[in-house]
């Protein structure tokens, strides 16, 4: 007789990823023969540049295929230090750098290293789906701060101040944001820094994963750069996944205070050990080699953003703000709530909207409630213009058919 399966108490607090679920559903429908466009997944459609692939092949040929230091090879830590200095004006020593298997793992290693039961993490909404779930898994308590389209989906100083309690361990910032694409200006970060300066017990985790995807004359800045006094309690996280189209390689990195970096290394030494040695060598080339790809990439994404924003704003009942960066838009469906879809179902929530859109027009997107802010939905426009045009035309047709 075997014992029935039971999840751990920690895992029972956690939801599976809504974005992965939406993408999997689209794939299943497609396999069943339906013509489905998925705008649910958050990854660039470009291939990893050849110079990076060649560095990985060379690493294999050179026998760089063994265990490495748990939190990264010295060459990659040096490349990360040079990147922070060059692009962000931040001086980190190699002993202040963590390299993990993906940006996701950097975040998890930071939370698991620092959160004790009851510790709070302030997370502005809409948020990337994994933040609150990781906090819960690590025994902490997410403290969600809703924003609005009126503030460009950015947290305001007063709202942040009100969310901080004596139990607050971390404030999480993500700019440009997944899912809204919103990016904080220097002045906006200054206002946030002023709040944080009044709360010395609070650490800052800034997820700068989409740093290179900002459009027009928007200038990216990160919080430790805006307020150097916060450097001692900031973990500046980034990675190669989005900037260099390397989602499958699994390399993320961060710079921060040594005691935190040492704690994260301790976690890795007893769990994953090092990220793939081959991927690490590829990341060295990504950071040290030509950066031409990044600008090209950003220009293409900007064109796509403009296409999608323009087409969605022509859909009846929909409003789509123009985000500063990343490859997402976060349109409102407020104008469609209470109306009836072609199936006869009344659209009461953003989830209803997404289910009915998939049903009627075969377009898969992710509902706003999954990111903690309704009534919106997220489109990832990291796909070809022709696909985006087709998808937006279908959305327009759906909105036109809603009565
Ligand atoms: C805001 C944000 N942070 C972190 C990550 C994770 O990146 P990685 O694929 O390197 O784990 C993602 C990926 O979707 C993201 O959108």
Image: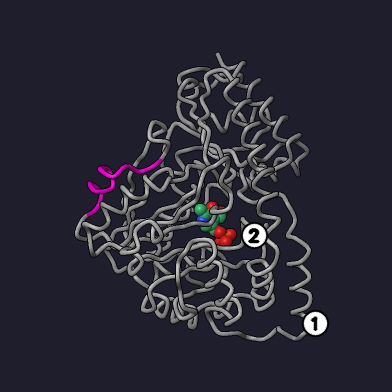
Residue 274 among magenta residues: no
Q: Quadrant of the C terminus?
A: top right
Q: Which residue is mark 1?
A: 61
At horizontal 38% and vertical 35% (from top left) the residue drawn is: 151
Which residues, given as a range, are shown in magenta? 154-164
Q: Which percent across, then down, holds residue 38?
A: 67, 40
The residue furthest left is 166
Q: Residue furthest top?
A: 403
Q: Is residue 163 magenta?
A: yes
Q: Secondary structure at mark 2?
A: loop
Q: Mark 1 or mark 2, which has the lower sequence index?
A: 1
Residue at image coords 50%, 17% = 339
Q: Secondary structure at mark 1?
A: helix
> Label 1 neighbourhood size at 10 Å, few (<14), some (14-19), many (20+)?
few
In which quarter of the view is residue 334 placed? top left
**Label 1 with label 2: CB-CB less than 8 Å:** no
Residue 343 seen from this side? no
Residue 247's mark?
2
In the rendered structure, the answer to whether residue 80 lies left or right of residue 108 reads right
Q: Is residue 215 visible?
A: yes
Q: Position of residue 180 (x, y in %)?
A: 49, 41
Residue 78 placement (x, y as % from top left): 56, 77
Of the four image quadrants, the one with ligand 1 is: bottom right
Ligand 1 under 8 Å from disc 2 Cβ = yes
């Amino acid at each position: 007789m075997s014992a029935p399966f039971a999840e751990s108490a920690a895992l029972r607090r956690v939801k599976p990823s809504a974005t992965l679920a939406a993408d999997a559903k689209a794939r299943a429908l497609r396999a069943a023969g339906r013509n489905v466009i998925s705008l649910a997944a958050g990854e660039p459609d470009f291939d990893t540049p050849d110079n990076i692939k060649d560095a990985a092949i060379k690493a294999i040929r050179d026998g760089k295929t063994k265990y490495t230091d748990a939190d990264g090879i010295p060459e990659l830590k040096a490349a990360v230090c040079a990147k922070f200095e060059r692009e962000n004006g931040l001086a980190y020593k190699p002993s202040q750098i963590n390299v993990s298997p993906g940006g996701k793992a950097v975040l998890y290693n930071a939370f698991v290293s620092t959160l004790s039961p009851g510790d709070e993490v302030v997370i502005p909404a809409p948020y990337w789906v994994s933040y609150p779930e990781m906090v819960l898994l690590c025994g902490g308590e997410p403290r969600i701060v809703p924003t609005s389209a009126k503030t460009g989906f950015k947290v305001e100083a007063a709202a942040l101040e009100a969310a901080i309690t004596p139990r607050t361990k971390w404030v999480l910032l993500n700019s440009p944001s997944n899912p809204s694409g919103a990016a904080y200006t220097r002045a906006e970060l200054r206002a946030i820094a002023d709040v944080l300066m009044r709360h010395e017990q609070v650490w800052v985790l800034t997820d700068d994963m989409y740093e290179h995807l900002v459009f027009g004359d928007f200038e990216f800045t990160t919080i430790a750069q805006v307020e150097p006094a916060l450097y001692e309690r900031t973990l500046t996280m980034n990675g190669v996944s989005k900037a260099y189209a390397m989602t499958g390689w699994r390399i993320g990195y961060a710079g921060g205070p040594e005691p935190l970096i040492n704690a994260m290394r301790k976690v890795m030494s007893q769990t994953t050990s090092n990220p793939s040695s081959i991927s690490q060598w590829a990341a060295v080339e990504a950071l040290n080699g030509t950066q031409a790809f990044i600008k090209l990439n950003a220009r293409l994404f900007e064109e796509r953003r403009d296409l999608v924003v323009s087409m969605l704003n022509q859909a009846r009942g929909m409003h789509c703000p123009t985000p500063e960066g990343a490859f997402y838009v976060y349109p409102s469906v407020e104008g469609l709530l209470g109306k009836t879809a072609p199936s006869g179902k009344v659209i009461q929530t953003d989830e209803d909207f997404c289910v009915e859109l998939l049903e009627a027009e075969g377009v898969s997107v992710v509902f706003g409630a999954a990111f903690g802010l309704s009534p919106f939905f997220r489109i990832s426009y990291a796909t070809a213009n022709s696909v985006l045009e087709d998808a937006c035309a279908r959305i327009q047709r759906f909105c036109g058919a809603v009565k």
